[in-house]
Image: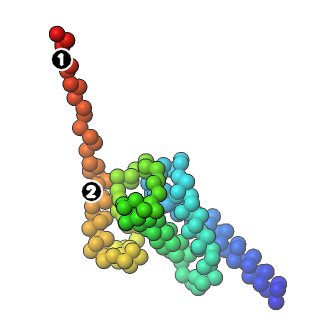
Amino acid sequence: MRERHASHGARRTREFEAFVAGAAGRLLHAATLLTAESPDDNPRAQRLLTLTLAQTYASWDRLRGDDPYDRARQYLASRFARGAWHQYGAWYRYGAFGRRRPKARGMLADLSPQERLILVLRLYEGVAEEQAGALLGLSPERVRAIYARAMTTLLHPPPGPAPTVPVAKPAPS
């Protein structure tokens, strides 16, 4: 009996390692896009990936024919959404319990966390509006509107601050 459990555990570990070898790079890229960090300096994305893979491994036996990548993507998206709510949600806005995080520097930094999440799911991951809406608890129409706003912001970024005009000092009398 003990040997059967050991062989099952070894098989489970091998299957998961094969999954990680194939999917970790893409999941890390998605996490980096979500956190809007630089690909060279992405500690939040790496932590998000680590937590996602840990949760995927913990539920590996319960997949029962489900696509493990799809499940990992769901974990990644929901974990990011929860973290973004805590970062930008009510607690952060009103100052209680909020923790400031470094300013995002990536190419999606001008987007809100929700816009980044929907853009990454739709554009990078190819998730349908209905699936993204079901995952995030939004209607497909709302997902479509947020996606359109994110694409507009990405393609037509807001102008930077107006240049300062030096003020001439009056001549001494």
Secondary structure under the numbered disc 2 in the rendered image? helix
Give the x, y percent position of residue 54: 61, 70
Residue at 75% x, 76% y is: 10
Q: Quadrant of residue 123?
A: bottom left
Q: CA distance from mark 1 to mark 2?
A: 45 Å
For the view shown, which residue lies furthest in the bottom direction?
1
Tell me the quadrant of the picture where the N terminus can be found. bottom right
Tell me the quadrant of the picture where the C terminus can be found. top left
Give the x, y percent position of residue 65: 57, 84
Lower sequence index among marks 1 and 2: 2
Q: Quadrant of residue 48?
A: bottom right
Residue at 30% x, 77% y is: 139
Residue at 56% x, 68% y is: 52
**Neighbours of disc 2 within 10 Å: few (<14), some (14-19), many (20+):** few
Residue at 63% x, 82% y is: 61
Does residue 84 appear in this view? no
Give the x, y percent position of residue 30: 48, 61
For the view shown, which residue lies furthest in the top direction?
173
Mark 1: amino acid: Pro
State the mark number for residue 152.
2
Q: Mark 1–mark 2 contact, CB under 8 Å?
A: no
**Neighbours of disc 1 within 10 Å: few (<14), some (14-19), many (20+):** few
Q: Which residue is mark 1?
A: 170
Q: Is residue 8 above or below residue 152?
A: below
